[in-house]
Amino acid sequence: MNFDVAFDRLMGNEGGYSFNKNDPGGETQWGISKRSYQDIDIKALTREDARAIYRRDFWDRINANNLHDGVAFQLLDFAVNSGIETAVRYLQRALGVADDGYWGPISERAAAKMSETDQIMRINAERLDFMTRLNAWTSFSRGWARRIANNLRFGSEDS
């Protein structure tokens, strides 16, 4: 999977402009939050601006090109929704290695030994378990659960 396919899928999970007082991200556009990007005019952010941010600050940082295609998308979506370190830690848990948030040779070896299908299933299980413990689960559970269900559908296509 290339970044463009992953980005288009991600945009299916992220919407346009939103400013929900219950959203921990606060003001967002295309899933880019004012909390994380304080110097950006969120309302004026274009889809192409968001694409550049997601490639540079997420796709490249999670080393997506070195993962199974389906796992790369799942990790990207998790990272956008919950933060890069959190997403990496939960993928590491899914792989059965120390969840230190650093993707190094031990994590890479574990990923190489596990099938793409197993990684997709396990990261989504870890993600759902993680999200049910968040305080915001009460407000956002329906949307988050649907997002993960949709990602499992993508996972069945990818593996």
Image: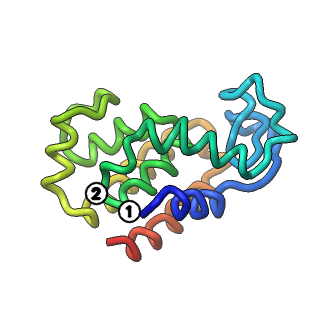
- What is the distance, in whole Å, between disc 2 and disc 1 at their CAs? 9 Å
Coordinates of residue 149 in the picture (x, y in percent)? 50, 66
The quarter of the rendered structure image containing the C terminus is bottom left
The image quadrant that residue 28 belongs to is top right
Q: Nearer the viewer, residue 109 or 89?
A: 109
Does 28 appear above or below 48?
Answer: above
Q: Left or right of 142: which side holds 44?
A: right
Residue 42 x, y percent position in the rendering: 81, 37
Where does the image place residue 95, in percent across and percent down from the top left?
Answer: 22, 47
Vertically, is 55 above or below 157?
Answer: above
Q: How many marks?
A: 2
Q: What amino acid is found at the position of numbered circle 2 in the picture?
A: Gln
Q: At numbered mark 2, what does the secondary structure look like: helix, strand or loop?
A: helix
User: Circle 1 sits on which residue?
Assistant: 70
Disc 2 vs disc 1: Cβ atoms closer than 8 Å? yes
Q: Residue at x 74, y 52 (%)?
A: 47
Q: Position of residue 133 (x, y in %)?
A: 49, 40
- Compared to 124, does 158 lie above or below? below
Q: Which residue is mark 2?
A: 119
Q: In the structure shown, which secondary structural element does the residue marked by tag 1 occupy?
A: helix
Q: Earlier in the sequence, mark 2 or mark 1?
A: 1
